[in-house]
Image: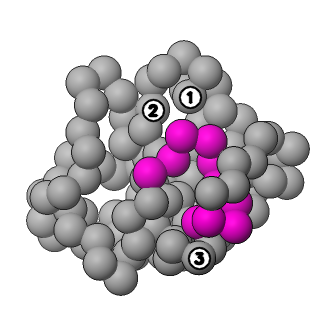
Amino acid sequence: MVFGLDKAKHPELTALELEAMLRGDQALVIDVREVDEFESGHIPGAINMPLSTLQPSKLPYQVGKKLVLTCLGGKRSSMALDKCNVAEAAVDTHLTGGFKAWQSAGLPVERS
């Protein structure tokens, strides 16, 4: 075992963990995919803030809710978290496997 290689760069939630948090009104999902991707299908209630124009200072914080970033597979949401970290924004978690993992888990999809 090589230390450090088994740990994710950012805290992650599984699709089922996120779904439970959403049912409990404990999370707010920010989808960092581009508008056309978001419109073709996204997590119900998610807010679209594309990575290409993401400004961490504009993230919609809500008391009592954890901000969770997502994208298609996890790469862009991780990049968005890096951007948020530099800006010292209070968001540090993303959906492991992104929207693909959400769909694979058979969870509901909303379309714009």
Between label 3 and label 2, give the one nearer the viewer.
3
* Residue at the disc numbered 3: 36
Residue 29 in sight: yes
Residue sitting at x 54%, y 40%:
45
- Amino acid tagged 3: Asp
Would residue 109 appear left or right of 2 to someone viewing this image?
A: right
Which mark is first along the chain, 3 or 1? Answer: 1
Find out whether the residues at labels 2 and 1 contact each other: C-beta distance under 8 Å. yes
- Amino acid tagged 2: Ala
* Residue at the disc numbered 2: 27
In the rendered structure, which segment of residues is drawn in magenta? Answer: 38-47
Residue sitting at x 37%, y 34%:
66
Q: Is residue 82 above or below residue 15?
A: below
For residue 53, the mark is none
Q: How is the image coloured?
A: one colour
The quarter of the picture where residue 100 lies is: bottom right
Q: Secondary structure at mark 2?
A: strand
The quarter of the picture where residue 51 lies is: bottom left
Quadrant for the C terminus in the image: bottom right
Magenta stretch, main secondary structure class: loop
The quarter of the picture where residue 89 lies is: bottom left
Would residue 45 appear left or right of 43 to someone viewing this image?
A: left
Q: Is residue 26 above or below residue 32?
A: above
Which mark is first along the chain, 1 or 2? Answer: 1
Q: Tell me the crowding category of disc 1: few under 14, some 14 to 19, or many 20 or more residues within 10 angstroms, Cα based.
A: some
Residue 85 in sight: no
* Residue at the disc numbered 1: 22
